[in-house]
Image: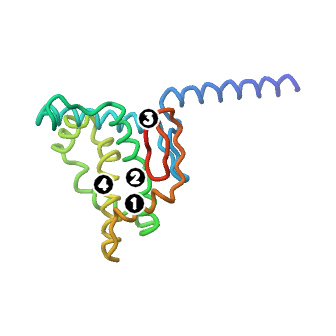
Amino acid sequence: MGKFKAYTILVLMVAAGFAAAFLVSQGYYPIVFVGDDFISAKRFAQSYSAASLYYENLVKTYGPVVPGDRIKPLDLELAVMNQLIDESLIREGAQREVGSDLAYLVENKLSRLKDDAELSRAAAILYGLNQDDFVSEVLTPQATRDVLVGRLFLRGEKVDSRLIAARKSARVTIFSTKFRWDGERAVTN
């Protein structure tokens, strides 16, 4: 009976190790904690890839703002990091404002867009995202922001001032050697 128990524990530990290795290899580990919410390495990489492709398409279409001037990859990564942190803070603020109605309100804003074939094609060309990823990475955060903006507008508040206050009071932990939280934003090390 003792050998069986030892083998069972060993098999469970090996299985847990393989599961952890698989999750890490797929990017399912946090690179940022924003309060109780986390941003995974996979989400960051996907957002960076979409932003990078969008920027390249923008430069191909309109050219750089200053001839020969291009955004450095690290600056784009920093912008994506701050955008994802802001999205998390906005989602938290919207959740406080509307409670359990947030999912319904966001879904209501997105319902007419989900089956738009033209939108799906544009998302693939501009961002390199399939329609589901485009909805979750671009449209859902924007719809959440719109819900919060609407609620704050009714009270005469602005989302930008609310976001500045949220950044100052946020508990943000960044697990990256490239970036750190300065109390208000992610900055490069």
Q: Position of residue 54 (x, y in %)?
A: 23, 37
The kind of secondary structure element at disc 1 is helix
State the residue at coordinates (27%, 33%): 71
Which residue has dot 2 on it?
Answer: 86
State the residue at coordinates (27%, 56%): 111
> What amino acid type is highlighted by mark number 2?
Asp
Colour mapping used in the image: rainbow
Give the quarter of the image for residue 137.
top left
Q: CA distance from mark 4 to mark 3?
A: 20 Å
> What amino acid type is highlighted by mark number 4?
Gln
Q: Residues within 10 Å of mark 4 (few under 14, many from 20)?
A: some
State the residue at coordinates (64%, 26%): 17
Look at the picture and state if 150 lies above or below 179.
below
Asked if marks 4 and 2 touch (Cβ < 8 Å), the reply is no
Q: Position of residue 34 (x, y in %)?
A: 51, 50
Q: CA distance from mark 4 to mark 1?
A: 14 Å
Q: CA distance from mark 2 to mark 3?
A: 17 Å
Asked if marks 2 and 1 touch (Cβ < 8 Å), the reply is yes
Which residue has dot 4 on it?
Answer: 142
Nearer mark to the viewer, of 4 and 2: 2
Q: Earlier in the sequence, mark 4 or mark 1?
A: 4
- Residue that lies at the very extreme toward the bottom in this rendered image: 155
Q: Residues within 10 Å of mark 3 (few under 14, many from 20)?
A: some
- Locate residue 9 relative to residue 155 in the image: left or right: right
Towards the viewer: 29 or 111:
29
Q: Earlier in the sequence, mark 4 or mark 2?
A: 2
Which residue has dot 1 on it?
Answer: 163
The kind of secondary structure element at disc 2 is helix
Q: CA distance from mark 4 to mark 2?
A: 11 Å
Which residue has dot 3 on it?
Answer: 42
